[in-house]
Image (cartoon, coloured by chain):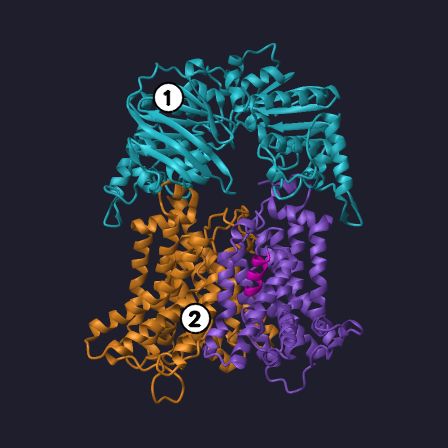
Amino acid sequence: MIRTALRWAVTAVLIPLVSVLSGFLVGALAILAAGADPTQAYLALFQGAFTNHNALAETLLSSTPYVFLGLALALGFRAGLFNIGAEGQFYIGSLSGVFIAYSIHGLPAVIEVPLALLAGMLGGAFYAGIAGALKARFGAHEVITTIMLNYVSFLIASYLVDTPGLMLAPNVSTPRTPDADPGAVLPIILSGSRLHLGFILALLTVPVVWFLIERTTIGFRLRAVGFNQGAARTAGISVSWTIVLTMALSGALAGLAGIVQVLGVDIHMTDTVAAGYGFDAIAVALLARSNPWGVLPAALLFGALHNGASFMQLQTQVSSDLISIVQASVIIFVAAPSIVGWLFRLRRASGETVRITQREVDAPVS
Amino acid sequence: MDLAVDWGQVHALLGENGAGKSTLMNVVYGLVRPDAGEIEFDGRQVQIRSPLDAIRLGIGMVHQHFMLIPPLTVAENIVLGNEVAKYGVVDLDEASLKVESLSRRFGLQVNPRERISDLSVGVQQRVEILKALYRGARLLILDEPTAVLTPQEIRGLFDVVHALVAEGKAVIFITHKLAEVMEIANTITVMRRGQVVATTTPSEATPADLARMMVGRPVLLRVEKKPATPGRGVLAVDDIVVLDDRHHVAVDHVSLDVRAGEIVGVAGVEGNGQNELVEAIMGLRPIRSGHVRVEGADLSHTTTHQRLRSGLGLIPPDRHRMGVILELSVADNLVLDDYDHAPFARWLVRQFDAIRSYAQKLVKTFDIRVQTPEQPAGSLSGGNQQKVVVARELGTLPKLLIAGQPTRGVDVGSIEFIQRQLVGERDRGLAVLLVSSELDEVLSLSDRVAVMYRGRVVAVLDARDADRERIGLLMAGAA
Amino acid sequence: MTDFLHQLDPISLLSITLITATPLTLAALGGMMCERSGVVNIALEGIMLTGAFIGYGVAFFTHNLWIGVAAAVASGMLIASLHAVLSISFLVDQIVSGMVINILAVGITGVFYRTYLESATTAGPGTLPHWDIPVLSSIPVVGPILFENQFVTYAMLILIFVVHFVLFRTVWGLRTRACGEHPRAAETAGINVYFVRYVNVIASGALAGLGGAYFSLQQIGNFLPNMTGGRGFIALAAMIFGKWTPLGAFAASLLFSGSDQIGSRMQSVFHVGVPLQFLGMLPYVLTIIVVAGAMGRAIAPAAVGRPYKKGS
C-alpha cells in the first residue's frame, strides 16, 4: 500500500515537479545568455502572472484555452494519436462558433451560448475528423496532415474574414467578423477583471473527460487501441472508427477552446491568428502525462507563463519567446525521466522506452 | 551454470520455453552481458562484450527469428559488417563470388543476387548459416532451427550439420523437441528455469527421461481422448481466395468444414496461408472470393465484431500482437470481446461489478494464476496470459473456436491444461479448428487433419490414417 | 501561343522553382539519411530555423557570409545531436523529441533575435553571390536554370548525387539501411547501431542547417522570426513522396515549389479569380494528398520510429 502510494507520488507529482524546476533552470541559463538577470526576469514573470493588479484573474483567463487544448491532446495521446492540429481545430471551431454567435439574435443566453459552443465543437470535430479519416483510410500520419491542416486553417480564416459577403463585418476599420450577439457572450464572473464563465466551463470539462476515458466504453476502446491496435482489432474493435472518433472528440475540445475564447474575450474574430497555442497544448498534455486531472495544474502553469511573459518582456527586455525555451525544457525533462534521474542521481533509470504517446509501436511513422 | 562443448560434436541444449537456453547463447554471442561467471574458448578465458567479439573468436549464431534484412540481397546480407569494399565502396561482384564458393563447399544452395524477401524460409535459413560461415565460424549455434522447416527440410539441415561436424566444427543445437535431440545430438544438456539440470547422451537417456528432466515431474506426452462424435456442420469454408499483404494469393480456393464436437487440425509449415485463412474466417482480412458460412449463415462480408457475436472465437497465433493487451487489467482482457454489451456496459457506461464477478468466475474455472483480476495482464507469465485468451474466448460460449498456435511459448503445465480444455470443450459439442505448426500437437489433438501447402489444402485425412511421414511429405508439397 | 509562353516565362519559372526547392531538398535529404537509419526526424523545421538564425547572426557579426554558412551547418549538427541524444540514448519518443526541438528553436531564435539582432542598425552581410559557370551557363534553356545560381543551390545539386552514392554504394550506406530496416540483425552482424544512428542524425542536422542558410543568407540577407514557414514539414512530405530516395526527394521538392510558383503565376498571368488564400493553400494541400496517397506506410524503412535498445 505504502509502496504504491510512494510510487504514485514519485511518478505523478515528483517527476513533473522536478521537470518544471529543471525547465526553469534551463530558462535561467538562456536569460543569462541573453544578457539579462534571471532573478529579475523571473520576478517580473511572477509579478506579471500573480501579483500585479488583476494578474491572477488574467492568469486564470489565459489558462482557460490551455485546459481545453490540454484535454484535447491528452485524449489523443491515450489513443496513440498525436493531434498537433489542435491549433487549426481551434480556429475552425472559432469560425463556426462565431458564425452562429453573430447570426442568431434575440434568443435567451441559455439557448444562444450552448448553440454557439456546440457549433464550435462541431467545427473542430469535423476539421480533426478529416485528419482522422485520412489516417484511418490511408494510413497518412496525423503529425504531417494536422500540421498542414493548421496552415490551411489560417488561410481559411483569413479568407473568410477578409472577404466581403462572407464573414467580414460591414463598416469596420480592420477586417474582422461581426460581434457576437450579446446573448451569446459569456458573462464575466469576477467583476473588475476579464475572467469569464469559460473558466468554470473548463474546470467542469476536466471531470467529464476523465469520466469519458476511464468509465465509458468509448474511453475503453480508445485506450485499447492506444495500447495495442492488433489485439483490439482481433477482439472486434474497429480501429478505423476509433481513430476517427478520437480525432473528432479531440477536435471538439480544441474547437471548444476556440469558441470559448471568442465568446469570453474577443467577442469577434480577426483575420490574424496568434500561433503558438498548439505547441503549448502539447507541453500541457505531456506535463500532465495524459491524465485529465493533471491537465489542470499544467494548464495553470502555462497560463501563468503566458501571462507573466509579456510583463517580463516589458520589464527586462527578455523576449516572451523565452517561455518556449522553458516549455521545451520542461517537456524534455518530463519525457525523459531518466535524464532527471541521471542529473540528480536518483534511482537508476531502467532505460525503459518512455511511452508518451502509447502508439502502436509497429506502425512506422511516415 | 556449467556448459562444456567439444569440437567435432553436436551438443543439444534442451529445455522448454523460457528455460533460458536462448538467453545463455545470447551471452555467448555477446548480445547479453552476464552478471557473473566466465567463458572459456579453446582453453582460454575470453570476454565477449558484443557480437563483434564473438565473431572474431569464431562463434556464429543462427537465431530463431532470422536476422536478415528483407529488402537487401543475399550477398549484401551475408557480407554486412564484413563488407568486401574498396575505399568504402561495396564490391558486390566480389562478394557474390565469395558467397558462391562458400555455398558450394557446404552444399547450401543460394543465389547471391536474390532479395531476401523473395526467398522461402528454408532458403533464408541457408543464408543465415552461410552468414556465420562467411565470418569463419568454427562454433555454430542454431536456435530452434527446425521450427520453420518441413520434415524433409529438417533432414537437409541435419545433413548440413553432419557436414560441419565432419570438418571439425562444433554445433550447439537449441531445441525443445525431444525426437530431434535423440537423433542429432552427441551430448545433451537439459536446462530448466535458468539452470543446467543434467548433461547426458542419447544412449543414456530416453525421451521420457529427458521430458522429466525438462519439467521436473513425469509428463504425459500424449493427450488422452475418446473418439469424437461429430454432430451437425458448424463451419463451412467454401472455395475461398485470400490475398496476403503483398497482394499475392495466400489462400488458393480452399474449402473446409468443421462439425460440432470435432477437432479439425490444419498441419503445415507456417507461411503456407494458414494465418491468412484464419484471418479471413474471422473477418480480419477480406475474402476475395468464396464464402464463409457458420451454421448456414453467410458471414463472408460481416465485421469481426459481428462474427464474434455470431459464435466464432479465436485464439490468435500471435499472443502479443493480437491476443492480450498487456497494459490493461486481466479483467479488462477477459471482457475484451464484449466490453460494450450488457452486462458489462449500460448505455456507454461500464459496469465494473459485473465485469469483476465475471472475471473472478473465469479465473477460477481456468486456473489463471493472479492475485487479483485488476492487475495488469503484462504481469502474468506467458502460459497464464494464454489462459486468459482461452478463457475469454471459451467464456463467450462460442460455436466454433479457431485455435491458432494455442500452446506456443507456453510452459508445459499450461500446455497440458489448454490441450485438455480444447478436448473437453470438443466433447461438449464445440467445433474446433486447430492451426498449429507443431505437428505432434496437431496429430495428438485432431480428429481430422488437413494439410496446407502453398495456400491449398492438399489433403484431409482421418487422424487414424495420418502418420508423420505421409503428412511430412504433404507439408512439403510432395506425394 | 508565343504570347502566352512569354507571359508564363517558363525559363524564369523553372529557375525559381529550382531555387525555392533548395531548402526543401536539403531538408528532405537530411530527413532521409536520418530515417534510413531508423530515426524519425520531424525537427527539420526547427533545425532549419536555427541554421537560418545562427548562420545569419554569425555572418552579421563576422561580416563574412562563408563563416555564416559554416555556422549554419554546425548549429544544425549541434541541435540535431540533441535530438539524437534524446531519442537514441534516452529512448524518448522520436516524435516528442522532434517537436521539442521545434519548440526550442522557436524559443531560442526568438529570444536571441530580440536581444541581439532586432534592433541592429548596421547593415547586414548581404546575400551569397551569384556564380555563373562559364560555358555551361550558355547552354540554351538548361544553362540559365542550372548554372547561374548561388552556393547553397549548387551544394544541393551536388549533395543529391553524393547522398545517393553514399546510401546505395558504400559500406556506410549499406549499414545505415540495415539499421533502419532491422537493427537487431545489424547488431548481430557486429554493427554498432547507436553509432550509425547518431552519425546519420547529426548528418541530417548538417544538411538541414545548410537548408536553413538558404533562407537568411541566400534568399533574403536577413533573419525574420519563423521565416521557414513550415517548409521543414513539407520537406518531410517530399521525402515520403520520393520514397526515401535522394532523386525522388528532389523531384518531389520541385513539384512542391513548382506548384507554389504556378499558383502565383496563375494569379498574375491568367487573372484567375481564385482567391489568394486558396492558392497559398496549394503546397499544404498537395502535401496532405501526397502523404495520404503515397502509402508511405508500405515503403518506409521498416524499423523507423522505433527506439532500439541493445540486445532487445
Q: Does the magenta stretch include residue C237?
A: yes
Secondary structure mainly formed by the magenta segment: helix
Task: Tell how many labels.
Answer: 2
Q: Is mark 2 on a helix, strand or loop?
A: helix
Foreground pick, C191 / C161: C161
Q: Can residue B38 be seen in this view?
A: yes
In magenta segment, residue A205: no
Q: In which quarter of the image is residue C23?
A: bottom right
Give residue C93's mark.
Answer: none
For the colour orange, the matching chain is: A
Give the magenta part as a residue range.
Answer: C233-242
Which colour denotes chain B? cyan
Numbered mark located on residue B420 in the image: 1
Mark 1: few, some, or many residues within 10 Å (few <14, many ≥20)? some
- Identified at 65% across, 48% down, the residue is C177
In terms of depth relative to the viewer, which is nearer, B2 or C15?
C15
Vertical side of A137 occupied by B439: above or below = above
Q: Which chain is purple?
A: C
Q: Name the residue under label 2.
A: A153
The residue at the point 42 percent across, 37 percent down is B279
Is disc 2 surrounded by few (<14), some (14 to 19) or many (20+) residues within 10 Å? many
How far apart, in angstroms, are the residues tagged by discs 2 and 1?
61 Å
Do the CB atoms of the residues marked 2 and 1 lie less than 8 Å apart?
no
Location of residue B148 in the rendering, given as x and y in whole percent from the top left corner: 55, 28
Chain containing the residue with disc 2: A
- At mark 1, the secondary structure is helix
Q: Which amino acid does label 2 sit on?
A: Ser
Q: What residue type is labelled 1?
A: Arg
Residue at point 31%, 17% (across, down)? B229
Residue furthest to the front in view is C1
